[in-house]
Amino acid sequence: MSYKSLGRSAAFGVFASVAFATSASAQMLVQDAYARSSNKMAGAAFMEITNQGASEDRLIDARSDVAKRVQLHTHQEDPNGVMKMMHVEEGFAIPAGETHLLRRGGDHVMFMGLTRELKDGETVDVILVFENAGEVSVQIPVDMDRAPKGGHGNHSGHGDHSN
């Protein structure tokens, strides 16, 4: 099957599934990842992270040379009903056997002060740092056209998971 016959988004999905199946650690499986930028200064990465281990782990950091600062972020509603993005210093807990979804409008990896433009079709190298599993290197495809879709996997306790 050729890239052209798949269509752009489907080809990214095939690439992402194959790339992450081979690049994740034995304990942490990263799937369905993509990155995009909202402007020339900021961007974000979204993905599913499955803890295949026997005990809880925690995503505690992310690094990439694509930005001056890379942080774990989430959106939270303030007392006035306004959604605000905020840094999550403690990271994201991922119980054994469960999947945590990093999605648009929720938890995500935030790139601030981009060192280069995120161009559709290229990849971004990111290192995810886990408390127990250690560092997991992933190549995340940039897909500026990807539309949000329904939730995935077991996301108990995390609310609506459209990404």
Image: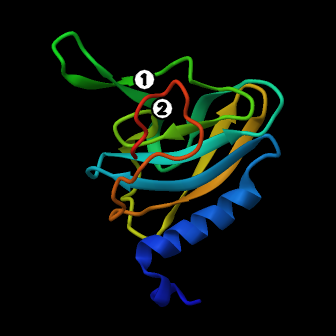
For the residue carrying disc 2, how many other residues have a C-alpha within 10 Å: few (<14), some (14-19), or many (20+)?
Answer: many
Seen in the image, is 129 located left or right of residue 81? right
In the rendered image, which quarter is residue 8 located in? Answer: bottom left
Nearer to me, 120 or 107: 107
Nearer to me, 125 or 100: 100
Residue 39 lies, in percent from the top left, at 26, 51
> Which label's residue is closer to the chain start, 2 or 1?
2
The amino acid marked with disc number 1 is His
Residue drawn at (73%, 50%) of the image: 24
Residue 87 circle label: 1
Residue drawn at (33%, 52%) of the image: 37
Rounded to the nearest angstrom, the CA distance separating label 2 from label 1 is 6 Å
Residue 81 lies, in percent from the top left, at 18, 18
Seen in the image, is 79 located left or right of residue 21? left
Nearer to me, 127 or 79: 79
Q: What is the residue that sits farthest to the left in this orientation? A: 80
Residue 116 lies, in percent from the top left, at 40, 56
Q: Do the residues under discs 2 and 1 have CB atoms within 8 angstroms?
A: yes
Secondary structure beneath dot 1 equals: strand
Residue 71 circle label: 2
The amino acid marked with disc number 2 is Gln
For the residue carrying disc 1, how many other residues have a C-alpha within 10 Å: few (<14), some (14-19), or many (20+)?
Answer: some
Residue 91 lies, in percent from the top left, at 56, 23
